[in-house]
């Protein structure tokens, strides 16, 4: 049995496969009377859609969202918001060669082992196309938290990463296909991705996210800690291999006297090694975290693998795939962050 729902108070349930008729979902728990900017929701989808540039998959999808329920005269009704995004450019024949073959490091094998059946067309439910529904729901969540700012960006592609000397300018993130906040480094990252693509290979990277103007008191001990739910949300995204927040793993090299965030008299802190969360509860400082993405599993080169009969075979990837998933993951990271925070925010309101 698959788990197709996310969230406690604000709950998203999704449906659809990569090469099925459509993708979609139901978002339940949205308060009534919220005036939704439907154009902004579409803008978020456009940031995620394929075919944006030469460094992403060339699948051409309009990704127009069609709302089916829960909105009347532009406002939420308080009832479930149903929505649908049609698949229009699926090319299932591109995947005939893997019908009985498992791609290394892909969900192909584990899905087949668990369920006894798999939709090999574009990966079916294991495809990153699943995240199109998350972005719709996250865009609505952002409008529930209209005063909170979510900014994710590409921090690294492979070993090429932003340094402390690089100027960070959020205004240039959407001005380059890599979505890096430094124009010079963005060009280097883009060139690296193009080189990797020509080799028929793929590469990973790190997304950083900063959430500003966060309300205090979001998150609940013991098993609903805010950072734990953020971690689960990020680790649910396709190809994610790691998550850390605040000082993260780098914090282990510091002494407590260096790591402690000392207070200002207004309750803010002089540093933010805690990443805006202490004891699992937001403290009002910026929340910041990193998400590590692995290289995409499908390569445009030959690899040894096995088939359904447990025989070793050679396969060569075909179809349309991202050489680096990081640039298109940016709106997905923001969307899942917004869903987690909006869920915690609405839960807080319900118990006061």
Image (tube, rainbow, N blue to C red):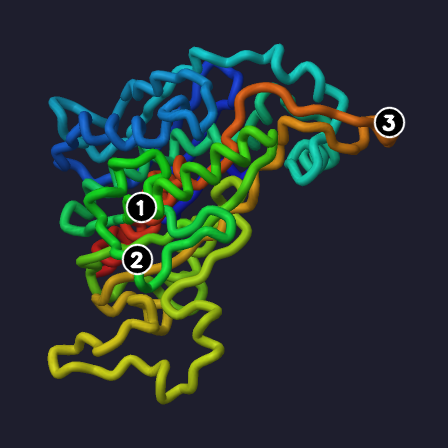
Residue drawn at 63 percent across, 20 percent down = 318
| Mark 2 residue crowding within 10 angstroms, few (<14) / some (14–19) / many (20+) | few
| Mark 3 residue crowding within 10 angstroms, few (<14) / some (14–19) / many (20+) | few
Percent across and percent down for residue 277 are 32, 68
Residue at the disc numbered 2: 166
Q: Nearer the viewer, residue 95 or 181?
A: 181
Residue at the disc numbered 3: 309
The first of marks 2 and 1 along the sequence is: 2
**Left-right relation of 348 to 299:** left
Label disc, if present, on residue 308 of the rendered structure: none
Q: Secondary structure at mark 1?
A: helix
Q: Secondary structure at mark 3?
A: loop
Percent across and percent down for residue 221 are 39, 68
Vertical position of residue 169 compared to residue 13: above or below = below
Label disc, if present, on residue 184 of the rendered structure: 1
Q: Nearer the viewer, residue 168 or 231?
A: 168
Percent across and percent down for residue 143 are 19, 40
Residue drawn at 27 percent across, 21 percent down = 67
Q: Quadrant location of residue 264?
A: bottom left
């Amino acid at each position: 049995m698959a788990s197709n729902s996310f969230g406690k108070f604000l709950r998203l349930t999704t449906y659809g496969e990569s090469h099925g008729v459509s993708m979609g979902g139901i978002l339940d728990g949205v308060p009534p009377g919220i005036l939704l900017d439907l154009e902004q929701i579409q803008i978020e989808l456009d940031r995620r859609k394929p075919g944006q540039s030469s460094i992403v998959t060339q699948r051409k999808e309009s990704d127009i969202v069609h709302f089916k329920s829960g909105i009347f005269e532009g406002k939420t009704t308080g009832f479930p918001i149903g929505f649908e995004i049609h698949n229009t450019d699926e090319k299932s024949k591109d995947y005939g060669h893997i019908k009985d073959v498992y791609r290394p490091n892909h969900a192909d094998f584990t899905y087949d082992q668990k369920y006894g059946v798999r939709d090999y067309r574009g990966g079916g439910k294991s495809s990153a196309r699943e995240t199109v529904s998350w972005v719709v729901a996250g865009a609505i969540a952002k409008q529930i938290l209209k005063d909170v700012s979510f900014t994710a960006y590409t921090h690294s592609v492979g070993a090429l990463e932003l340094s402390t000397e690089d100027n960070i300018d959020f205004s240039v993130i959407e001005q380059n296909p890599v979505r890096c906040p430094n124009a010079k480094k963005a060009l280097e990252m883009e060139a690296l991705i193009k080189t990797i693509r020509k080799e028929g290979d793929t590469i990973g990277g790190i997304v950083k996210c900063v959430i500003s103007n966060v309300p205090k008191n979001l998150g609940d001990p013991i098993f609903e800690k805010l950072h734990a739910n953020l971690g689960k949300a990020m680790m649910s995204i396709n190809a994610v291999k790691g998550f850390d927040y605040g000082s993260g793993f780098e914090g282990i090299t510091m002494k407590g006297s260096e790591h402690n965030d000392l207070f200002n008299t207004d309750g803010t802190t002089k540093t933010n090694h805690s990443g805006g969360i202490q004891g699992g509860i937001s403290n009002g400082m910026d929340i910041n975290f990193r998400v590590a993405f692995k290289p995409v599993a499908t390569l445009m080169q030959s690899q040894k693998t096995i088939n359904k009969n447990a025989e070793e075979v050679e396969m060569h990837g075909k179809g349309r795939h991202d050489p680096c998933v990081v640039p298109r993951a940016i709106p997905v990271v923001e969307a899942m962050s917004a869903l987690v925070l909006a869920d915690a925010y609405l839960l807080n309101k319900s118990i006061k």
